[in-house]
Amino acid sequence: MAEFKTKKAARAAELKTAKEWFSHYPAMVPKRDATGVAVKGESFFFVEECEEVLSATGAGARGLIVPRDAEPVGEKFRGRPTAVYYDVYRLSDCTAKRVITKRPPRAIDLLLAIFTVTKAAKRYRDAAFAHYRADRHGFATHAQRTKENLYRLKDRGIAQAYQEGRLSFEGIYHRLGLYRGDGYCFHSTIIPRDRMDAEALDEQEWIHIVASPKGSREGRLKDAKHTLSSLSDQTGDFDRCPAPGMDYDD
């Protein structure tokens, strides 16, 4: 262990006190197991015995996070752009941010894609209504437009599935075309060209069904949108009936 007779000699060997290392740039503190060198009643530390300190923002810039239970080792001051004191933490207490790998959108089953965007459209429909009731008109408009875009994708998928024979046209219910296939049931404003005079199915009272939270039966919305947006738009080959006063639910 090195020995120094004077503090001046210790500083000449590039040792500093804990306070001096904290004022240094970059700011540092002695490691937890650092012993230091006693010089005239004061501890001095080699740089190798110290570690850098970081603010939460500084840690984030390095791809690190400060755990919630980490104890700050001190407080620093910044004068610009506004005067503020902020806590700093040991670099050794910081942990790497969890890297979330996002899976790119992929094609999924056509009927599952239609079902998924239908369920999502219902949620945006209900959100638009809730925002409107709360006078959040900007949010209401965004939700309404998103819902309409999803319904357009839904109709594109129904047109494709009908052409492929995966959905059959069952008739007209409340001025909407009813399609079924593979256990799915959908309503749409598009009607096959030669079926506008189809006999109306048994009428029942219109029931406004509140969209349920996303369930396990659904696919990922981005997969459904990717699948349907990649289709050619064949809805122009269908007639379109006027939409009913309320959004259709299936």
Image: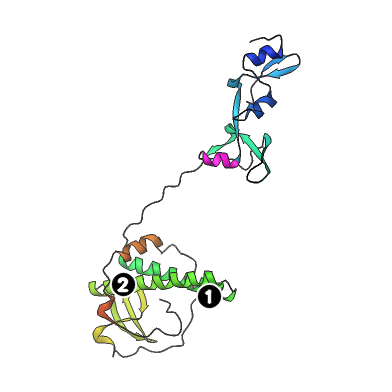
Question: Is residue 38 depicted above or below 233 in this figure?
Answer: above
Please determine whether, in this image, residue 203 is positioned above or below residue 238: below
> Residue at (68%, 10%) from the top-left corner?
4
Quarter occupied by the C terminus: bottom left
Q: Quadrant of residue 7?
A: top right
- Mark 2 neighbour density, 10 Å: few (under 14) some (14–19) many (20 or more): many
- Residue 219 appears in the figure: no
Q: Which residues are magenta?
A: 56-62
Residue 85 on image: x %, y %: 68, 41
Observer able to see residue 13: yes
Q: Position of residue 222 (x, y in %)?
A: 39, 60
Secondary structure of the residue carrying numbered label 2 = helix
The answer to whether 165 is drawn above or below residue 172 in the figure is: above
The kind of residue on which mark 1 rests is: Phe
Nearest to N terminus: mark 1 or mark 2: 1
Residue ID at (28%, 66%): 231
Residue ID at (64%, 21%): 34
Query: Along the horizontal axis of the image, is 145 left or right of 237?
Result: right
Disc assigned to residue 156: 2
Type of the residue with mark 2: Arg
The part of the image, by quadrant, that contains residue 5 is top right
Q: Which residue is mark 1?
A: 129
In reply to whether residue 111 is colored magenta, the answer given is no
Query: In the rendered image, which quarter contains the N terminus?
Result: top right
Crowding around mark 1 (Cα neighbors within 10 Å: few <14, some 14 to 19, many 20+) is some
Element at label 1? helix
Query: Residue farthest to the right?
Result: 41
**Place of residue 218 in the rendered image (x, y in percent of width and height, measured from the top left):** 41, 64
Image color mode: rainbow
Indicate whether 38 appears above or below 119: above
Q: Main secondary structure of the magenta part?
A: helix
